Amino acid sequence: MGDYELFDITIIGGGTTGLFATYYASMRNMKVKLLESQSQFGGKVMQFFPEKLIYDVGGYPDILGEDLVEQMISQANRHQPVMLTNRWIETIEKESDHFILYTSNGERHATKAILLATGSGTFHTKTPDNWDTLPFPEFRKRVATNLMNQDKYHNKNVVITANNKVGMGWALHLKETAKSVTIVNPDPKFHQVKEEDLNRLLNSSVQVYLESNITDIDVKENQLQSVAIHKKEQETITVKTDELLTYNGLELQATPLDNWDVATYKGRISVEGDMATNTPGIFAAGDIVQYEGKTNLIASGYSEAITAINKAHLFIDPRATEQLYSTVLYR
Ligand SMILES: Cc1cc2nc3c(=O)[nH]c(=O)nc-3n(C[C@H](O)[C@H](O)[C@H](O)COP(=O)(O)OP(=O)(O)OC[C@H]3O[C@@H](n4cnc5c(N)ncnc54)[C@H](O)[C@@H]3O)c2cc1C
């Protein structure tokens, strides 16, 4: 899909800021492309809290993280912009009157203006140390690393492998609706947990295995059947399992801002009220920017995205209006 077709604006990063910017730019009749490095849109919301209720986004008294992202994808798609996943942007080059973006797999994307909505980078989930020694590699790639689509755990035998408060939180949450929940922790204790949560776990129906590893999995016709759990110096046991989740923490792959010719301060892009970077034609919004009074919230990203897109529009067409009302536009 990478090619020399010239877009008005290319948005790097498909978190909540980039998704909203995609909608807004296409509402402003710009030719828009969104490039996201992960296999899914939603950024931090999907990586950290898809299962949590968010209370501070205007218009929703409360909304699940994954539901907010679903609504945002649907809104972004209203004018069918180009929205691509699995694209990690490595290099930005200026060529006469436009930019060329290069992805890590060698694609090139041509654009008149750029919006950087990259947050601090992208987060990859770490897998347990022995993960690669387990069979069924294709199945392992699909093992859940977050608590999306919670309905699928209803009345199921669930096994979680985790050594931290996230996995413990999932176990406490899922025990209410799952048939059974087992948590397997390779370490002698859970990290970063409150004592009251640990006591709740130990006094609950959740089966807890410490200093234990999953040493085998059995999959038939794409459906998990069981996992083998080995505890140091003890016999290996087999546990009937319908669903497996794993959480071993996240690793940040930082956005290569140093290569992008934008001024930064403490790892963030310095902008003024117009969301312009020091390079004409490159704008930024969301968690990646820094200015006095900046807040790192979903709603702040929306407002910054509007400003950035309106300014980018003026950059490529100085006759464009500063802003538009959607109520007037869609009359
Ligand atoms: C635990 C936690 C709880 C939170 N709770 C709330 C809350 O209750 N309310 C609230 O308003 N905010 C909350 N926040 C903050 C909120 O999540 C962020 O402000 C918001 O998600 C920022 O969105 P963003 O799109 O700017 O950045 P991100 O969500 O970080 O998205 C950036 C995207 O860019 C992609 N990307 C990065 N570099 C590249 C590259 N080189 N090429 C291609 N793609 C790239 C990433 O993969 C990612 O998808 C919370 C944050 C955390 C961590």
Image (tube, rainbow, N blue to C red):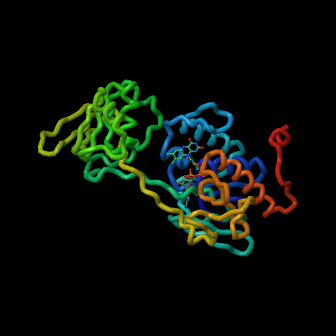
Which residue lies most toward the right here? 319
Q: Where residue 18 appears, x then y in whole percent? A: 63, 51
Residue 33 visible (yes or no): no
Residue 207 figure quarter: top left
Quarter assignment of residue 201: top left
309 or 26: nearer the viewer: 309
Q: Residue furthest front?
A: 195
- In front of the other: 227 or 59: 59
Residue 226: where, in percent of width, then height? Answer: 26, 35
Q: Is residue 192 above or below residue 54?
A: below
Q: Is residue 191 left or right of residue 121?
A: left
Q: Position of residue 220 (x, y in %)?
A: 29, 36
| Residue at image location 27% in from the left, 44% down from the top | 189
Q: Position of residue 329 (x, y in %)?
A: 84, 42
Q: Quadrant of the N terminus?
A: bottom right
Vertical arrangement, residue 100 with respect to residue 298, above or below: below
Relative vertical location of residue 317 with respect to residue 206 in this rendering, above or below: below
- Quadrant location of residue 94? bottom right
